[in-house]
Amino acid sequence: MSVSYPSTRTTAPGRLVKFHAPEIVFGIGSMVEAAHAVLRLGGARPMLVTDPGLIEAGWASELEDQLREQGLTPVVWSALTPNPKDHEIAAGHDAYREGECDVLVALGGGSVIDATKGVAVLAANGGNILDYEGVDQATSPIPPLVMVPSTSGTGADVSQFCIVTDTRRGTKITIIGRALVPDVTVIDPRLLTTMPEWLNAATGLDALTHGIEAFVSLAHNPLTDHHALRAVGLVTDTLVRTIEEPMEMESRAVMAQASLEAGLAFTNAILGAAHAMSHQVGGLLDLPHGVINGILLPHVIRFNATDDATPFVAIAAALGLEERRGTPEEAALAVADRVERLAREVGVPKGLGQLGVRETDLSRLAEFALRDACMSTNPRTATHEQMVALFRTAL
């Protein structure tokens, strides 16, 4: 396993640092703690948001039984697709109101968790979920949130982010707010064993992207740097093994920890250009977010390193790369190459063109990416022309 080296960067004197995090319960067999959490939060009729895959795998019925054992009356809603759509969140809100629910429980991956947060926003604030794009636009307190993640990478279960597909414009919007940080997240590595292989790869690369982008973010701080570097090393060392031995629980637990640490890093340090770009491709083509990140991240690393490669020395050290002893530019290029190699190892396509992105899409994708909230903390600014060129490089 590679060694995580601490960042030598410091926070400017006088700068305030905040670190948002939910209550975290972690461990094999911990899912039952979600039911206890609902009870502690005053719930009586929790809405359990999940998806057909989790129902088929049996996890939804297990959690539903645990909720009932606590004397609760759960309402199950699963009318979701990947990359939750604005109209799906509206339908979930209708189900929440009709069920007279009081606490929201998400059992699933990033799409389920984002949809749950969207329902919570509407439950307290009304209107259309797209009205809340941006930072702190939802002002009324939302219902309590309990998260049970079933993938190892999105970090949505600890984050202040909610990503929603705007179906009219064919893009994704980002909703950010302290209120969206869940009250409790229960991380049970058992749930990772039923992920399809492609989803395991995609979410793992998402966690890697979270770690790298959080570390180089303009909003990084000493409280996020350690988590970011830990996540980068853990994912790179472990992801392939979880694909080769999907039932091996030690590796699953490590990946669950990597996802958690990456989530804690990025929700506080925010992200960068890879996510700003990925949101647009995912919104346009309704594709897996982590797969797109796996294609884009090496190109974004090279782009950012042209402006300042210094932060990538610590990342190279966390990955155990010899180039950490060279120039910062050499370290950054080695990190990009290592990420690219990992993406190939887990089956991610080489370019966006293989996913269906066309040359004629690039100007529009660049325009929306530059408006994405994640661009505000990318360490290098970009013009429209530079963003188009970056997308073209990733084709």
Image: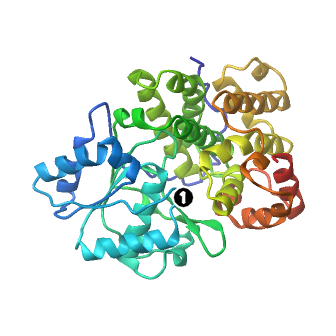
Residue at the (29%, 76%) spot, across then down: 97
Quarter-wise, where is residue 386 in the image? bottom right
Quarter-wise, where is residue 203 in the image? top right
Residue at the (62%, 25%) spot, across then down: 5
Residue under pointer 1: 83
Q: Where is residue 296 in the image (x, y as percent from the top left)?
A: 73, 45
Q: Position of residue 144 (x, y in %)?
A: 30, 62
Label 1: few (<14), some (14–19) or many (≥20) C-alpha neighbours in 10 Å = many
Q: Is mark 1 on a helix, strand or loop?
A: loop
Decide: is 172 above or below 342: below
| Residue 240 appears in the picture as rendered | yes
Decide: is 341 above or below 311: above
**Relative to residue 56, is residue 20 drawn left or right?**
right
Residue at the (53%, 22%) spot, across then down: 244
Q: Which of 37 and 379 is in front in this view?
A: 37
Amino acid at circle 1: Asn
Q: Which of 358 and 68 is in front in this view?
A: 358
Decide: is 266 above or below 240: below
